[in-house]
Image (cartoon, coloured by chain):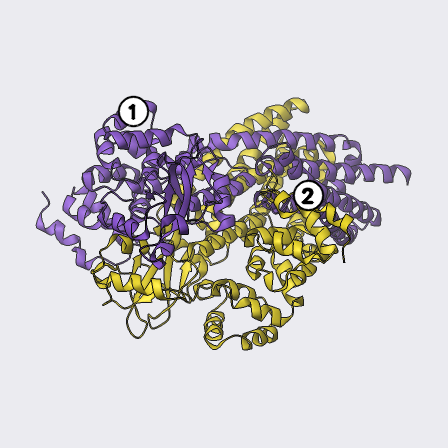
Chain colours: A purple, B yellow
Amino acid sequence: MTNIDEDRLRPTTEELPDDIYSEEGAIRADFLAMVGAAIADRDVLFLRQNVAKLHESELGDLLEAIQPDQRLALVKLLGADFDLTALTEVDETIRMEIVDQMPNEQIAAAIGDLDSDDAVYILEDLDKEDREEILAQLPFTERVRLSRALDYPESSAGRRMQTEFVAVPPFWTIGQTIDYMREEEDLPESFTQIFVIDPTFKLLGVIDLDRILRTKRQVKIETIMRETNYPIHADMDQEEAAQLFEQYDLLSAAVVDDNGRLVGVLTIDDIVDVMQEEAEEDIMRLGGVGDEELSDSIADTSRSRVPWLLVNLVTAFMAASVIGLFDATIEQIVALAVLMPIVAGMGGNAGSQTMTVTVRALATRDLDIHNSWRIIRREAGVGLLNGVLFGILIGAVAGLWFQDPNIGGIIAAAMLINMMAAALGGIMVPLLLDKFGADPAVASAVFVTTITDIIGFFSFLGLATWWFAIS
Amino acid sequence: MTNIDEDRLRPTTEELPDDIYSEEGAIRADFLAMVGAAIADRDVLFLRQNVAKLHESELGDLLEAIQPDQRLALVKLLGADFDLTALTEVDETIRMEIVDQMPNEQIAAAIGDLDSDDAVYILEDLDKEDREEILAQLPFTERVRLSRALDYPESSAGRRMQTEFVAVPPFWTIGQTIDYMREEEDLPESFTQIFVIDPTFKLLGVIDLDRILRTKRQVKIETIMRETNYPIHADMDQEEAAQLFEQYDLLSAAVVDDNGRLVGVLTIDDIVDVMQEEAEEDIMRLGGVGDEELSDSIADTSRSRVPWLLVNLVTAFMAASVIGLFDATIEQIVALAVLMPIVAGMGGNAGSQTMTVTVRALATRDLDIHNSWRIIRREAGVGLLNGVLFGILIGAVAGLWFQDPNIGGIIAAAMLINMMAAALGGIMVPLLLDKFGADPAVASAVFVTTITDIIGFFSFLGLATWWFAIS
């Protein structure tokens, strides 16, 4: 199909760079151009040799980097050589886009080769109809396993677990266990521990592989297995499971059902993704952004950001109406209008410092009932100290600027009041939201800035009105 | 020392709760009270039975939860039963406080039992003199290992690695390898892969334990080992190493020196800590907070927050001076003073949304040269769309409030301008900071709010001055 001259534009596999990434960590532009040209030329041979062999995460990065219209073309050209696991490494929007347009037969054919956790990850995004159709084409055991995992609630351990594991009875010896692993063809692709179960699949214990390798052949499994101190229930939220992994440095953990029967295993690589998502979520929420992704359209992005801007609009009008109370004073002394954003803004910054620390400490469970009073006292102390410091500083500068010691004194006092309000608001708002079961990362910022804006304007303009009225 | 009645206050070990944590994840108040009483009574027996047996991370949480003056007392009462690893689980401030006051002999005696990565973690915080004194008391090999790790730069893979590992020659069989592991006493506490080296310790390959267990005894190591595709140099920054772990789902990885010799192994549990620290850092920096910890004093906290507040003070005065340019206009139309914080504030919120997304995308390397133009165009589109939307909304409300369509039109136009400025500032500032090698998380917020404040005030007051001058 392609003529010889065109082929000369693309290097042979041997000439290709070892690493598809540039120094900055982006995919190399020359590699991207070659892949683009190969897709345009429908050069299946080149793609099979150079793209199909990439690691799933590299292939995922490549899918994100190429032009949107090339993505599906690449998947179709690769056909059975396309590693579906790569779809677990891309943005949800891109995954949906590709999976929606892939023939269900291609998905069904490829999904059987995946670890069950990856398969579930892809299947859970599909609509019910497509999902049923794909599941119907899978072998019976495969279908049962995946359906069972899909039955657990979203974001639960049961959804994230892998249903492939190695389990042996307690009366086996180490020798029997090793022989079994040497003979058995159908083992998970990789594993770091094996589980001990009774005939009803009830979980009895667990043994790390290094323990097996250190133990003599004739030793019985039950004598070296240890109890699983941290059994994870399939319904447990994935974030809670992640906390157990982090606290006890687990590499994998058994997942059990209501009857204590082993149904799967959670592994650290999935948990690392959960931890990253969780931190990501906190950052996004603190910045007033929802679940948006880089590949979202303008309309989707706008829609996801409008709600937070609307809430802020309401609070901005509230703050403005506080200013409106004092319009007569501002008319007489315009300097107040010039200076009032400084009082509100500095308070807002101080408040968001305290709030950030508090929200993080709550997320990592470093802040709890034992130390919250100590931290509230500390933040109040910091607010007082920084309030005095910045009150004096701003008071001096403002007094000199407008050649009026009254204005200097008024702004200094207002600054002190607002820094204290910022400190208390910054810690109390997230603590109270957390106490009432709300996510402090979502709503704290709005409440804290509303407090610092309103108290900032009210204290500054109110003090000024009162002072100039009596003097 | 304690009388019988006091003893009755403390339950026996059997009566103690199974879980030291309450539902909310904090340490149970009754357990805390018992420990506190036991420390006060110097009840070593109770502490040995109930505190020494805790998991290192539980002991760490306990140390953070008890009163500051009880911490050292607890460590001294436990003596040789105190698991030094717990210190790797607490705030740096608390770790320093305890380690500084522990006798060097107690540290030296305990540190030999630790994994080398934990030992280094504790030693690196000590001052040089104490460190030398402790190292001098260790056995030769231990000393050499720890010194070598401490010689690598801070935050490098060499600092975080564990120097204990299992390495075998390529010509051994699986059988020989298993026999070696069964006989050898001095193996690492836990491991998931073994390394293959030549006589000069040069790294040849790696084998996962599950691979060993599936392979027949007579098979040679060299036939089943795989090349390490991602060898980590000891000088590599830990964040870069973490990225490799995440991308390739590694559980552990060999660390090599300049000559390709195996010097240690990095494990996923350390890498998880690195990832958490990194996400934490981004959140804190975006919130204008430095490296502070929950256990810091008022003075330390205040000191760490003042620099960012100072920077904001300068920009706040810059924004105020923009308002000052238009004081004559404000004197005539006070409504402008009432409304101007809305324009600036909404721009600030929109800018921080875009900035948050950009900073995160840069940190996760999702944003790179291939898609930055597309994302800039998208953000500009979102700014335009939301600018029109909120311009109309705010214009209508403001026009009705002050019964003046002129004011409504002016604020609508200013809003549109500032939303566009927010979108472009929100994406360009972090991109440029990143391009010039600065950390976008640190300085973006200041620059973006400065832009939205100044453009917000200038466009609104400037437009008003011009409009009322010509009409």
Q: Check the picture and name the quadrant holding the C terminus of chain A.
A: top right
Q: Position of residue B458 (x, y in %)?
A: 61, 41
At a point 41% along the width and 60% down the height, the residue shown is B266
Quarter location, residue B184: bottom left
**Mark 2 surroundings: few (<14), some (14-19) or many (≥20) residues within 10 A:** some
Q: Can I make out residue A449 in this image?
A: no
> Which residue lies under the disc numbered 2?
B30
Q: Secondary structure at mark 2?
A: helix
Q: Is residue B245 above or below residue B328?
A: below
Q: Chain of mark 2?
A: B
| Residue A339 point in image, percent of width and height | 73, 44
Looking at the image, do the residues carrying marks 2 and 1 touch, with CB atoms under 8 Å apart? no
Residue A75 in the figure: left or right of residue B404: left
* Element on which disc 1 rests: helix
Relative depth, front residue between A145 and A227: A227
Residue B23 versus residue B15: which sits nearer the camera?
Answer: B15
Q: Amino acid at mark 2?
A: Asp
Residue A156, position as x, y percentages in the image: 45, 34
Q: Mark 1, chain letter?
A: A
Residue drawn where x is 13% and y is 51% of the image: A7
Local crowd size for mark 1, using a 10 Å CA cut-off: few (<14), some (14–19), many (≥20): some
Q: Which residue is mark 1?
A: A132
Q: Is residue B33 left or right of residue A273?
A: right
Position of residue B445 in the picture relative to residue B381 (left or right) = right
- Check the picture and name the quadrant holding the N terminus of chain A: top left
Q: Can I make out residue B332 in this image?
A: yes
Disc sitting over residue B460 in the figure:
none
* Disc 1 residue type (three-letter): Glu
B76 displayed left or right of A385: left
Q: Closer to the camera: disc 2 or disc 1?
A: 2
Q: CA distance from mark 2 to mark 1?
A: 52 Å
Decide which of B318, B138 is in the foreground and name it. B138
